[in-house]
């Protein structure tokens, strides 16, 4: 078991390395560096100015070398002016000008430095931690709404395949997966938040949720995420439940005259929930995409917003950190789902 | 010319009728719910599937009532559509006009269903769909949009991109044109959008764009996934490890970041998507060549013809699509569309790969595979002609679901301004363009939103139907 | 629905500011045209009577919806949002008011000689930096010299101070400290627009030893406020600086800038949730919506426009399609400028007189020439003659509400004329990378107080922002002549020739000049829309 987890961790590190290398290569293509210079020094600067800006801020070294600087295995280059004063470089971003002796030689991931966000003007680690915490809160409430609802829907529907309840709940589930977030979110805002035509029960902006979540400012974003995600889990639960209900031991129990409610609660439920468990875990990374839309729609400055802003402004260090987080989230949830599957299902052993 | 009403001359009769039907349906539904709750104890003693026969009278009564009310609802809805077609033009309402415009679709739908139903016993899995109401509804919805895409030119009332008529900006459904030219259609049936274009025509034309891109991109992703997934699952070993690692890598990418990185003009300038297209578009050709080669190895003549044809036609398409270098100048794909297309294929391929690999791992232990192995069949023959056909059920289901997912993804891209060119009538772009003003001018975004939802709903229902029927096999 | 302000009322308003009409007569005529009294007062500027503009009370908090950007060295500011924040701390020598007139801030007064080659700046006395040191002529001179430094990447002040610069620096003797509170500035060539340059948003005055640093690095300024919190992309909080005695008046205790992104529907959601009291700007159909939910609408006519221009130097597939004047003229002739005005900005602005970059009724040096008329036959004839009928024009624009729609409307008309047009839309983050080089694209241009400023900035052969590839010695010579004339009225004769040249050259399609809008809650004072989007939190307060 320990070996298994260790091996998965190794794969995770390898994946993160490959991923960051790809992201690094793409964000460091010459036109993208030019874009960075222009967002930093002014949208309308000339090509010469772009060149000297890149030179001065340590973006002109060969790409692999700079990837090494980011990792912290290569000492970071420092640009100096004619008089020998330090003017810029990887270790100097976000630091006020200082003397050359005081500039650290390495400032990469291995030293615990995740770099400096050129868009948000703060250390990446601070930004990502803060944004992840906010998105975590959003995700928590989305899951807290979505999962119980989806499981109830799925179990009720799968309990009696083909009944009116099944048909109704299945239709609702399918309809909810067919409604993209950018449709449901917008409709929710108009219906529930607009003061011109709507009910004005909630607010269509989650900006104030940063200072404290309230029922008003958090309901709509949570509902939007939950609605789209719910249908899928509900359908998986239903399929799993329906399969269990036709299993031999359930039939036997029925013939023995065990009460239907007891059959469902005591015998069927546990086995029927194994499959949905893995599905729920695998929903995490997928939710990341959904969260990006919802955060943009409801002006919630979370992780998804940081991703979009970083990509739009070619914020290299931020995007690298974002992709590392993504890899970790995806692979850790996969791991948990595998282990959990094995623990729940005595017939399978982790190997 | 005056403003059209929704129902036209049919309104006075049918509007009360539909009201009554809805009311009846509501009452029946509530009644049935109560009865179902009250009689739950009695019914739950029986095995599933036998419930209806042994149910108490009240339960059966309300259930029948529910079906009856639902039937009435459908009949009245049909009356709107059929009546709309039959009415003379000056008495038609918006629904009547819409129904009339869709006439080619109705005819095609009717013919397809009639023929398919008649020959359903000879049509394999597809025929079985007609035993499954859910699948039939799904198929109907999907076919509706497919035929709309096919007949789009006959259905549209205006040019969806070029007809920008002054004074029609953000107008309500049924607004007449100020001074229509000779032979021009004289109303904006579903109103005008923020650039004074006809919402209805854009919705119809959008079906063509969406149904050209989404299924094709999904198909390409399947080609890639199958060509790589079959050997990965069948042969295993290092080949499998490397590919699985690569697939996991792509899947761990947040989709939005991947798109931002691929679709930004800078990357496009560097030609990255073009190279990706060059690689990804090779897979269908490889797939077909291997397919023919494996099957007709013993008939060199036939094999050579098929492989030659594949190279000729495939190569021609490949040059046109991937390199924009069709020697005949017929096939080309606009830059903006190509990038989106390639990116969507790229994002979907690893998931398909995983599914195919998983299915192959499962199927390769079956007896008929072992039998083929002892017969001395080649590895590719076994993969393509033994394993693949037996994996078709789950793959077909996933194919339907994946088209729906891709359709939604296209809209997501439009949401971040990364999608197709802005005047493209595709649904995602239209929703995104109109969503800000939904509360004042609801129709420009709602019409494509309903379209996207109904198509995805149809695909999901179809997938459900297929799953149920293929499990019965 | 709100009614639009009658154009004649705007014309009268400008006569009032020029002193050609009395205020009383103006109010009478304007209200007779259906303009409400408060709107009429709005038209003639903010410095007007207590009746229209009550004195705000002391104290209170104001929340403003605005993009929260990072603060850089002020010289390289490229968005006025940056100055809206820093203006609370670092101030300006002079300030442009809504009506285009200048008002002294850190100067007490200034004077120019007749041929605009010597300016005397009288520095305000009794002003202190918030670290306690006095503000003097040395600070002013150091800042002006700093503005002239062309070696700083992105220093846009250099273009505004061009007449002071030689070899990339302020020329010897152009900036002279006379005494502790007097500075003399001597342009090398006559320059009638220098003071407007000093009022522009990158011209914030920082301490003499802090030039080149961002405000966030030191926080030292003359203003009444200090930055309490700055989170790029989220929010910025300004509070009154308790340790500093401000030279002027400041009402509010606390100002919060909140970032809602660029999507106006998100702004509306924020307003519906009562999360802010004032918008930075309001656009398109949302103007009516915000007015309908009870917010105060403030409109100002400007020379803000969208220029849809071919670049005659750009190559497409080995040819220079727009080097031929017939092609350029054909494009302009195929377009009725009323259509982009309606479809692009819902008629919120005025149609241009003809395709030249001087706004009638806004720029005091605008000269009337023959108006533009759409002529499709002529357009097709010219295009055929040039043999370019089959050429596919790729029209590039940014992905943003009105600019995209305006460009789409132009594209649609070009297609109607039988030309082949392909539209390309780029996200804002990438559009500006090569904005001067696209073969055929649309660019938005901000407001400038006089027509000659814009022409110098965008159409001179050597201008860094020349996006049309138009380089004409004759045009440059006329520009030199016009620039040397300080009086707008006298400049008109030469302006007419410049304008006509632009039309004949088919320089671009310039369909309209926008009005700008801002919404705020009733009871807020001093928040009216400014032609350059300026927000000075010192002037804001609650009634």
Image: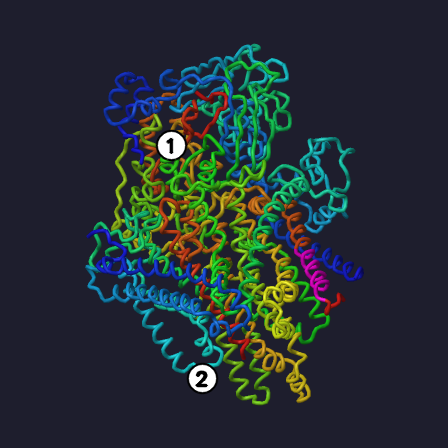
In the rendered view, would you say C487 is above or below C400? above
What residue does disc 1 label?
A: C294
Q: Position of residue B168 (x, y in %)?
A: 29, 48
Alpha-carbon neighbours of circle 2 within 10 Å: few (<14), some, or many (≥20)? few
Picture coordinates of residue B59, whole percent (x, y): 44, 67
Task: Determine the secondary structure under disc 1.
Answer: loop
Which residue corresponds to the image point at 46% horizontal and 68% vertical from the top-left? B326
Q: Of C341 and B37, which appears nearest the observer?
A: B37
Q: Quadrant of the C terminus of chain C?
A: top left
Chain letter of the residue carrying label 2: B
| In-front residue for pair B135/C485 | B135
Q: Which residues are magenta?
A: A330-345
Seen as rendered, the residue at the extreme right is A3
- Quarter of the image holding residue B378? bottom right
Residue C18 location (% of width, % of height): 33, 19
Quarter of the image where one finds residue A127: top right
Q: CA distance from mark 2 to mark 1?
A: 67 Å
Inspect the magenta stretch and tell me whether residue A335 lies in it. yes
Q: Is C29 located above or below residue A296 in the figure?
A: above
What's the magenta bit mostly, secondary-structure-wise?
A: helix
Q: Quick one: C43 or B436, which is closer to the camera? A: B436
């Amino acid at each position: 078991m320990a070996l298994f987890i260790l091996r998965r961790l190794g794969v995770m590190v390898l994946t993160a390395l490959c991923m960051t290398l790809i992201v690094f290569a793409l964000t460091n293509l010459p036109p993208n560096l030019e874009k960075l210079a222009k967002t930093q020094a002014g949208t309308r600067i000339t090509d010469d100015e772009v060149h000297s800006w890149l030179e001065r801020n340590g973006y002109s070294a060969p790409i692999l070398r700079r990837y090494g600087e980011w990792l912290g295995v290569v000492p970071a280059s420092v640009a100096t002016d004619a008089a020998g004063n330090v003017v810029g470089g990887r270790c100097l971003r976000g630091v006020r000008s200082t003397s050359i002796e005081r500039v650290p030689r390495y400032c990469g991931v291995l030293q615990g430095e995740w770099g400096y966000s050129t868009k948000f003007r703060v250390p990446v680690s601070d930004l990502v931690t803060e944004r992840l915490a906010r998105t975590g809160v959003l995700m928590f409430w989305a899951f807290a709404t979505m999962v119980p609802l989806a499981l109830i829907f799925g179990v009720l529907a799968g309990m009696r395949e083909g009944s009116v309840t099944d048909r109704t709940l299945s239709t609702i589930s399918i309809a909810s997966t067919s409604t993209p977030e950018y449709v449901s979110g917008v409709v929710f805002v108009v219906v529930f938040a607009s003061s011109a035509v709507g009910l004005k029960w909630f607010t269509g902006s989650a900006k104030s949720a940063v200072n404290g979540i309230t029922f008003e400012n958090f309901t709509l974003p949570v509902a939007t995420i939950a609605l789209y995600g719910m249908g899928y889990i509900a359908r998986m639960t239903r399929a799993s439940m329906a399969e269990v209900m036709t299993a031999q031991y359930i039939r036997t129990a029925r013939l023995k005259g065990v009460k239907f409610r007891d059959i469902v609660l005591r015998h069927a439920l546990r086995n029927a929930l194994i499959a949905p468990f893995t599905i729920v875990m695998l929903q995490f990374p997928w939710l990341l995409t959904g969260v990006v839309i919802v955060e943009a729609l409801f002006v919630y400055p979370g992780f998804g917003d940081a991703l979009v802003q970083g990509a739009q402004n070619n914020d290299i260090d931020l995007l690298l950190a974002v992709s590392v987080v993504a890899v970790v989230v995806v692979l850790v949830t996969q791991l948990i789902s595998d282990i959990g599957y094995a623990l729940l299902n005595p017939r399978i052993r982790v190997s | 010319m005056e403003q059209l009403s929704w129902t036209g001359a049919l309104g006075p009769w049918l509007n009360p009728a539909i009201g009554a039907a809805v009311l009846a349906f509501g009452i029946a539904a509530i009644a049935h719910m109560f009865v179902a709750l009250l009689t739950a104890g009695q019914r739950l003693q029986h095995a599933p599937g036998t419930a209806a026969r042994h149910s108490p009278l009240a339960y059966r009564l309300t259930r029948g009532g529910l079906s009856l009310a639902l039937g009435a609802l459908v009949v009245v809805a049909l009356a709107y559509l059929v009546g709309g077609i039959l009415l003379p033009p000056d008495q038609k309402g918006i629904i009547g006009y819409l129904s009339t415009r869709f006439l080619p679709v109705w005819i095609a739908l009717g013919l397809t269903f009639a023929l398919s139903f008649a020959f359903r016993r000879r049509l394999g899995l597809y025929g079985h769909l007609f035993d499954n109401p859910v699948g039939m509804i799904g198929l109907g919805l999907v076919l509706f949009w497919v035929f709309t895409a096919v007949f789009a030119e006959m259905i549209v009332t205006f040019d969806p991109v070029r007809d920008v008529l002054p004074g029609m900006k953000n107008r309500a459904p049924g607004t007449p044109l100020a001074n229509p030219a000779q032979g021009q259609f004289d109303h904006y049936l579903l109103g005008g959008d923020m650039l004074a274009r006809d919402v209805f025509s854009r919705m119809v034309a959008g079906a063509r764009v969406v149904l050209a891109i989404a299924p094709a991109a999904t198909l390409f992703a399947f080609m890639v996934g199958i060509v790589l997934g079959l050997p990965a699952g069948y042969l295993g070993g290092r080949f499998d490890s490397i590919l699985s690692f690569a697939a996991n890598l792509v899947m761990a990418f947040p989709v939005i970041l991947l798109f931002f990185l691929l679709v930004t003009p800078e990357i496009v300038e560097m030609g990255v998507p073009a190279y990706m297209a060059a690689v990804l578009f090779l897979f269908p050709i490889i797939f077909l060549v291997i397919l023919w080669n494996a099957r007709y190895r013993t008939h060199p003549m036939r094999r050579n013809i098929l492989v030659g044809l594949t190279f000729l036609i495939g190569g021609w398409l490949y040059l046109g699509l991937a390199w924009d270098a069709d020697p005949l100048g017929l096939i080309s794909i606009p830059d903006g569309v190509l990038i989106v297309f390639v990116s969507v294929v790229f994002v979907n391929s690893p998931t398909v790969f995983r599914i195919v690999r998983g299915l192959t791992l499962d199927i390769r232990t079956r007896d008929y595979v072992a039998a083929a192995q002892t017969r001395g069949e080649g590895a590719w023959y076994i993969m393509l002609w033994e394993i693949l056909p037996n994996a078709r059920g789950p793959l077909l289901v996933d194919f339907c679901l994946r088209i729906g997912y891709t359709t939604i993804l296209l809209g997501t891209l439009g949401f971040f301004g990364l999608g197709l060119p802005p005047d493209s009538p595709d649904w995602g772009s239209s929703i995104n363009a109109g969503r800000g003003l939904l509360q004042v001018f609801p129709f420009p975004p709602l019409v494509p939103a309903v379209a996207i939802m109904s198509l995805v709903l149809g695909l999901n229902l179809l997938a459900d139907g297929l799953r149920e029927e293929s499990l019965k096999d | 629905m709100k009614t639009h302000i009658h154009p004649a009322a705007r014309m009268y308003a400008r006569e009032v500011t020029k002193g050609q009409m009395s205020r009383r007569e103006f109010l009478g005529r304007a209200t007779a045209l259906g303009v409400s009294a408060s709107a009429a007062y709005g038209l003639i500027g903010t410095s007007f009577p207590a009746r229209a503009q009550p004195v705000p009370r002391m104290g209170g908090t104001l929340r403003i919806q605005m993009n929260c950007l990072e603060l850089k060295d002020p010289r390289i500011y490229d968005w006025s949002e940056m100055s809206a924040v820093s203006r609370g701390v670092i101030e300006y020598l002079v300030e442009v008011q809504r009506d285009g007139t200048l008002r002294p801030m850190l100067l007490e007064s200034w004077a120019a000689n007749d041929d605009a080659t010597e300016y005397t700046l009288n520095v305000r006395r009794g002003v202190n930096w918030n670290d306690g040191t006095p503000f003097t002529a040395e600070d002013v001179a150091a800042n002006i010299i700093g503005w002239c430094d062309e070696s700083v990447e992105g220093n846009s002040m250099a273009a505004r101070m061009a007449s002071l610069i030689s070899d990339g620096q302020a020329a010897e003797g152009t900036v002279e400290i006379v005494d502790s509170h007097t500075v003399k500035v001597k342009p090398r060539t006559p320059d009638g627009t220098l003071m407007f340059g000093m009022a522009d948003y990158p011209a914030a005055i920082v301490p003499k030893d802090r030039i080149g640093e961002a405000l966030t690095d030191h926080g030292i300024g003359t203003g009444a406020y200090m930055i309490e919190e700055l989170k790029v992309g989220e929010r910025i909080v300004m509070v009154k600086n308790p340790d500093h005695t401000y030279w002027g008046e400041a009402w509010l205790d606390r100002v919060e800038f909140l970032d809602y992104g660029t999507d106006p529907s998100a702004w509306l959601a924020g307003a519906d949730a009562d999360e802010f009291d004032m918008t930075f700007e309001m656009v398109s159909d949302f103007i009516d919506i915000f007015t309908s939910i009870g917010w105060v609408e403030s409109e100002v006519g400007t020379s803000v426009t969208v220029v849809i221009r071919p670049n005659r130097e750009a190559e497409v597939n080995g040819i220079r399609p727009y080097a031929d004047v017939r092609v350029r003229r054909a494009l302009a002739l195929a377009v009725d400028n009323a259509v982009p005005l309606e479809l692009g900005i819902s008629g919120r602005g005025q149609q241009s007189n003809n395709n030249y970059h001087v706004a009638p009724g806004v720029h005091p040096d605008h000269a009337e020439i023959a108006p533009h008329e759409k002529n499709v036959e002529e357009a097709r004839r010219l295009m055929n003659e040039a043999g370019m009928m089959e050429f596919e024009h790729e029209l590039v624009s940014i992905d943003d509400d009105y600019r995209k729609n305006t460009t789409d409307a132009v594209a649609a008309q070009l297609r109607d004329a039988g030309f082949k047009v392909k539209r390309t839309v780029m996200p804002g983050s990438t559009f500006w990378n090569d904005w001067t080089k696209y073969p055929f694209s649309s660019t938005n241009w901000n407001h400038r107080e006089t027509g000659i400023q814009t022409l110098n900035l965008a159409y001179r052969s050597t201008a860094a922002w020349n996006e049309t590839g138009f380089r004409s010695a004759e045009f440059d010579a006329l520009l030199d002549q016009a620039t040397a004339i300080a009086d707008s009225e006298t400049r008109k004769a030469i302006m007419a020739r410049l304008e006509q040249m632009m039309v004949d050259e088919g320089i671009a399609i310039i369909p309209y000049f926008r009005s700008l809008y801002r919404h705020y809650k009733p009871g807020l004072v001093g928040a009216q829309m400014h032609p350059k989007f300026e927000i000075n939190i010192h002037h804001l307060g609650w009634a």
